[in-house]
Image (cartoon, rainbow, N blue to C red):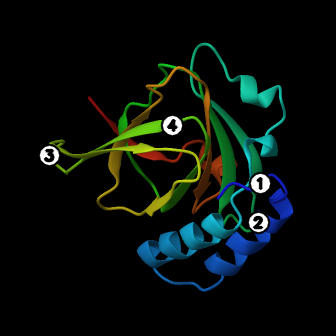
Amino acid sequence: MLRSSVTLTDLVAAVRHAVDARTGWTDTADLVADRLRAHLPGPEILTPEQRLGRPDRVAGHLLHAEPDGAFSVLGLVWRPGQTTRIHDHITWCVVGVLSGVEHEELFDDALNPIGVRDNPPGEVSGFAPPGDIHRIRNVGDETAVSLHIYGTDISRVGSSARRHYN
């Protein structure tokens, strides 16, 4: 459930609590996903200007990076038709859709398609390597906004993607 009254401070405190449990990546992704479900903000967590996105690519906005590098929170804005390349990740990741619909394609290690899902507002999912190869695209007519929480400081490493596939 989206809650416009949830603040970034509330969300960061909840994620910090989950990460402090110091479990493995898969369990951490599950714990953080549970916390995000309970503290899922509305798209207003981004400014009106940030929610406009970019015409040339998916726009990412760093909202928080934990000082010790344990996690970071990004708001992503997807204009209609924007997509990622097929990729996997350097760490666990949790995604919550705030507006619009994100179409996700899942792949196995040989890049065979193994699933497709449309993630509407309020949908939260978490995953960890291995088994995290996917592509996300906005196939709708409206801009989509999602919150991505990664198990690293994205401002230090530059990207959550470990590999891109053709």
Nearer mark to the viewer, of 4 and 3: 4
Three-letter amino acid code of the residue under disc 3: Ala
First in sequence: mark 2 vs mark 1: 2
**Disc 3 residue crowd, few under 14, some 14–19, many 20+, Cα 10 Å:** few
Q: Quadrant of the N terminus?
A: bottom right
C-alpha span from label 3 to label 1: 34 Å
C-alpha span from label 2 to label 1: 8 Å
Are the residues tagged 4 and 2 within 8 Å (C-beta)?
A: no
Residue 43 location, x and y as percent? 73, 42
User: In this figure, which residue is indicated by the disc labeled 2?
Assistant: 12
Nearer mark to the viewer, of 4 and 2: 4
* Element under disc 2: helix
* Element under disc 3: loop
User: In this figure, which residue is indicated by the disc labeled 1?
Assistant: 64
Q: Residue at x 61, y 26 (%)?
A: 143
Residue 62 location, x and y as percent? 73, 44
Is residue 64 among what the camera can see? Answer: yes
Three-letter amino acid code of the residue under disc 4: Val
User: In this figure, which residue is indicated by the disc labeled 4?
Assistant: 101
First in sequence: mark 4 vs mark 2: 2
Query: Mark number for residue 110?
Result: 3
Relative to 155, 27 lies left or right = left
Are the residues tagged 2 and 1 within 8 Å (C-beta)?
A: yes
